[in-house]
Amino acid sequence: DAKTTQPPSMDCAEGRAANLPCNHSTISGNEYVYWYRQIHSQGPQYIIHGLKNNETNEMASLIITEDRKSSTLILPHATLRDTAVYYCIVSLRSNDYKLSFGAGTTVTVRA
Amino acid sequence: GAGVSQSPSNKVTEKGKDVELRCDPISGHTALYWYRQSLGQGLEFLIYFQGNSAPDKSGLPSDRFSAERTGGSVSTLTIQRTQQEDSAVYLCASSTDGSRSEQYFGPGTRLTVT
C-alpha cells in the first residue's frame, strides 16, 4: 500500500477555508485517495474520496494533482466543530477493508 | 438516514467477566467491521463480515474474542474472561460491498475492565 505524509498540525480561523495537504507519491494507478476525520471521543467519520478528478460533497472538496502524487482536502468554511484529526489514506476501493490511519493532521479551528 | 448504532456506549466490567457489545449497521450495508482503539492509539482491525461469506477473523487478538452476525444485519462482539488490556473503545463500521474503503463508523463502546 502507498503511504501518505501529512503535516502534524495546523490552525485555522473560524469561517475561513482550511486546506489540508497530503503527499502520496507512491500511489498506484488503481488506488483511491480517502479522507477521514476523528473528532475527540467520537468514531472516525468518512469525508470524501477520489481517484483522479476533483470531488466535492456537502462536507468538503478534494483536489488531486494531475500526477496524483498529492492532494488537498478543503473545508470551505471551517467551524469550531471541524476541530479534529484528519487522516488521508490511499487504498483499493473494493479490496482494502482493514483501515489503518497514520498520525494524521490535528486541525484546530479557532474563533 | 440512521447511521451505525452501538450499544452500550459505556461498559465497566470486572476482570474475568464476559461482555457482549452490539452493533446495528446502516440498513442495506452488506459489509460490517469491528475495530478497537486504545487510548491515543490507532485503529486495530478485529473482524470483517461480508454477506454469507466466512468472516475474516484475522484481527481477533485471542480466542477470548468472538463475533457473530445474525441475519446479515446486527452483530455482536463477545469478549470472554475480560482482562485489563481489553480496555479500549470498540468501534463498529459498515459499508457497501463495492466500497469497502468507504466505511461508516458508529460512536463506539468504551470498555473499561477493572
Image: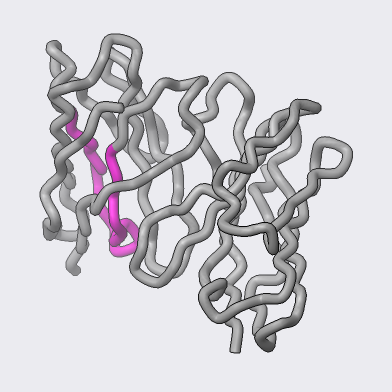
Question: Where, quadrant-wise, is the C terminus of chain B in this rendering?
Answer: bottom right
Q: In the rendered view of the protein, which quadrant contains the N terminus of chain B?
A: top right
Q: Residue at x 74, y 69 (%)?
A: B80
Left or right: where A56 falls relative to A68 = right
**In this figure, which colouring scheme has been used for the structure?**
one colour
Say above or below: A41 vs A89: below
Residue B41 appears in which quarter of the rendering?
bottom left
Q: Which residues are magenta?
A: A71-88
Pinpoint residue A36: horizontal percent, then vertical percent: 37, 43
Q: Is residue A111 above or below residue B51?
A: below
- Which quadrant holds residue A41? bottom left
Residue A58 x, y percent position in the rendering: 41, 36
- A83 inside magenta stretch: yes
Q: From this viewpoint, which residue is outermost toward the front?
A: B63
Q: x, y percentage for residue A3?
A: 22, 33
User: Count of labels shown?
Assistant: 0
Instruction: Determine whether, in the image, residue A3 is placed left or right of residue B37.
Output: left
Between A66 and A60, the one nearer to me in the picture: A66
Q: Any magenta on residue A51?
A: no
- Depth order, front residue of A38/B51: B51
Q: Nearer the viewer, residue B48 or A21?
A: B48
Q: Position of residue B94 (x, y in %)?
A: 62, 40
Which residue is found at the position 31% from the left and 35% from the top?
A89
B88 to the left or right of A61: right
Residue at 14% over, 38% down: A21
Image position of A52 with respect to B54: above or below: above
- Report the residue at 31% width, 59% height from top: A84
Tell me if residue A69 comes above or below residue A11 in the rendering. above
